[in-house]
Image: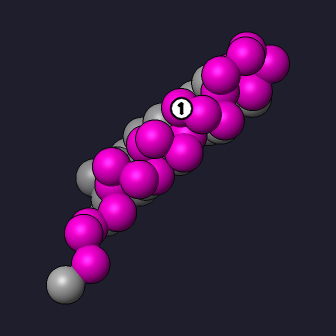
Amino acid sequence: MEELLRQAADVRSVADAGVRLAGQAQELPGFEVGVCVLEFEATPPPG
């Protein structure tokens, strides 16, 4: 049980760091373009 709690805390801290990074990146030009490209690459091709 303690191991699960530790893993959950790790995931939460990583997610928090990701949110902070995204917040900083939004202030940079080209951020939206990068997100669109990432979403496109992460989307499996139709069919």
Q: Residues within 10 Å of mark 1 (few under 14, many from 20)?
A: few
Residue tagged 1 = 34
Query: Residue visible at 65% across and 27% down?
Result: 31
Residue farthest to the right, as pictured? 27
Q: Is 42 rendered above or below residue 35? A: below
On the rendered structure, is 11 left or right of 1?
A: right
In the depicted view, which residue is nearer to us: 9 or 1?
9
Asked where in the image residue 43 lies, by quadrant, the reply is bottom left
On the rendered structure, is 5 left or right of 23?
A: left
What is the image's colouring? Answer: one colour
Picture coordinates of residue 20 (x, y %)?
Answer: 68, 28
Query: Residue visible at 24% across and 69% down?
Result: 45
Q: Is 30 rendered above or below residue 32? A: above
Is residue 24 visible in this depiction of the protein? no
Secondary structure under the numbered disc 1 in the rendered image? helix
Query: Residue visible at 53% across and 32% down?
Result: 34
Tell me which amino acid carries mark 1. Answer: Gly
Query: Residue visible at 43% across and 43% down?
Result: 38
Q: Is residue 17 magenta?
A: no
Picture coordinates of residue 1 (x, y %)?
Answer: 31, 64
In the depicted view, which residue is nearer to us: 45 or 26?
45
Q: How many marks?
A: 1
- What type of secondary structure mainly makes up the magenta span? helix
Q: Is 29 rendered above or below residue 9? A: above
Q: Is 13 rendered above or below residue 29? A: below
Asked where in the image residue 17 lies, by quadrant, the reply is top right
